[in-house]
């Protein structure tokens, strides 16, 4: 099986920290997705571009034929620049601004995923002004929990996302009376980094219930969008670089009861790009005190915020040092003066020196795109293996 490959000799001239993307891993991941969805002529995957909006990465994803899931006007602009056709764009988001709705209408995107009645009214009004009809799905909050970090569950009643199930018929009837929106289906998204297939099974069951309810009232839908959320193996990215797409798609194949003519849409972000990317950082100092040994690197949470924000663990390897039989314990920390600027604690690395390059693995999703300018730091660049050959 492929593992991410590091052309370390080519890294010498590049300013650290930077993101490195292995397009071989990315292409194999996309192939694995396509192998599964090609078994169904009504399955469509939209890459959730909020996970990674690097143009070079997006071009590879576009070549593989995936559609796109956007959550902002800026993302719509970026994916159009990357060459994605507008008619493969779905546009979600709990707080779409008027200009973003206008952009979606002007570009004739595939579908707006609508999260409230006020939003429905605004879309109808703007579409009317433009003499257009917006295709819409309603994002329904399925009240299905996901066994993941509290900050990244989205499908519970307490979360801010979507429309409550009990209001489903009401909003559909409202939409059906409007002239400038066309109601097409339902959208769901229960959270992220989900590894328990039972969570997706629970969602499929919930969708079946809702469909039965709609059918009893003579309401037919064309589109079922189940969102994304499939997780990746952060603990062993090298042993497990390609997520288990077979199990994931099989859940929906087995449990989701479709009516004739329906299409199923998936919005995968993390699972597509996490494992092809790494943050490459240089060790500036090694410092020891009575109880700790620190590797102080030139990357901080401004470059990769997941450990600080979600307590996320990323595997870290030393690309420079010879692997050794008796590794030492290090806290790998950044230069920013906040204690949360720590990538990991008490991890084993071969004896590490100033100047060594470390790779923080599984950083292709929610990495580069979440970088910030805090401390007037520079935004990290992103490079692919193809550029560095
Ligand atoms: C974030 C998001 C996704 C992608 O989630 P992943 O966990 O990266 O797969 C899909 N759909 C919506 C609506 C989202 O907000």
Image: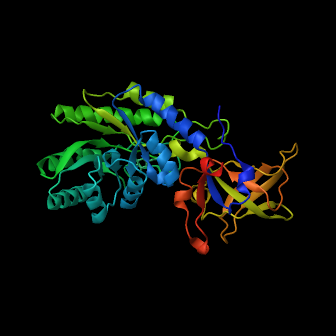
**Residue 184 placement, left or right of 148:** left
Between 253 and 238, the residue placed more toward the observer is 238
**Residue 77 placement, left or right of 153:** left
Tell me, yes or no, if residue 345 can be seen here: no
The vertical placement of 376 against 303, above or below, is below
The vertical placement of 359 against 199, above or below, is below
**Residue 298 placement, left or right of 168:** right
Tell me, yes or no, if residue 297 can be seen here: yes
- Residue 231, how many percent across, how many down? 53, 41
Q: Quadrant of residue 131?
A: bottom left
Between 46 and 178, the residue placed more toward the observer is 46
**Residue at horizontal 67%, vertical 67%?**
339
- Residue 94, how many percent across, how many down? 34, 57
**Residue at horizontal 50%, vertical 28%?**
246
**Residue at horizontal 35%, vertical 52%?**
92
- Residue 6, how many percent across, how many down? 70, 46
For this orientation, the residue located farthest to the bottom is 376
- Residue 329, how many percent across, how many down? 81, 52
């Amino acid at each position: 099986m492929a593992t991410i490959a590091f052309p370390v000799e080519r890294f010498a001239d590049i300013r650290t920290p930077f993101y490195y993307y292995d397009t071989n891993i990315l292409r194999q991941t996309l192939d694995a997705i396509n192998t599964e969805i090609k078994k169904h002529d009504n399955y469509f995957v939209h890459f959730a571009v909020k996970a990674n909006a690097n143009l070079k990465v997006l071009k590879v994803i576009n070549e593989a034929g995936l559609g796109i899931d956007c959550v902002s006007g800026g993302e719509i602009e970026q994916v159009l620049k990357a060459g994605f056709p507008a008619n493969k764009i779905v546009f979600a988001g709990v707080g779409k601004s008027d200009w973003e709705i206008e952009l979606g209408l002007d570009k004739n995107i595939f579908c707006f995923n609508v999260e409230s009645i006020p939003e429905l009214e605004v879309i109808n009004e703007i579409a009317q002004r433009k003499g257009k009809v917006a295709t819409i799905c309603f994002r329904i909050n399925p009240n299905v929990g996901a066994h993941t970090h509290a900050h990244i569950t989205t499908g519970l009643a307490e979360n801010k996302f979507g429309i409550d199930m009990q209001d489903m018929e009401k909003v559909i009837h409202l939409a059906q009376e409007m002239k400038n929106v066309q109601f097409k289906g339902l959208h769901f998204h229960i959270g992220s980094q989900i590894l328990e297939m039972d969570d997706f099974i629970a969602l499929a069951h919930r969708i079946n219930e809702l469909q039965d309810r709609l059918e009893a009232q003579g309401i037919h839908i064309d589109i079922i969008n189940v969102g994304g959320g499939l997780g990746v193996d952060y603990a062993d990215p090298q042993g497990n670089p390609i997520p288990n797409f077979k199990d994931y798609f099989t859940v929906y194949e087995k449990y989701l009861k479709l009516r004739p003519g329906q299409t199923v849409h998936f919005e995968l972000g993390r699972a597509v790009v996490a494992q092809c990317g790494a943050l490459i950082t240089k060790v500036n100092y090694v410092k020891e005190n009575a109880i700790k040994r620190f590797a102080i690197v030139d990357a901080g949470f401004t470059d990769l915020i997941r450990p600080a924000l979600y307590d996320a663990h990323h595997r870290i390897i030393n690309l420079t040092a010879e692997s050794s039989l008796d590794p030492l314990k290090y806290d790998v920390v950044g230069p920013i003066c906040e204690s949360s600027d720590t990538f990991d604690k008490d991890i084993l690395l071969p004896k590490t020196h100033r100047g060594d390059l470390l790779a923080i693995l599984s950083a292709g999703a929610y990495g580069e795109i979440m970088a910030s300018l805090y401390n007037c730091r520079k935004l990290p660049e992103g490079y692919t293996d193809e550029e560095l050959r």
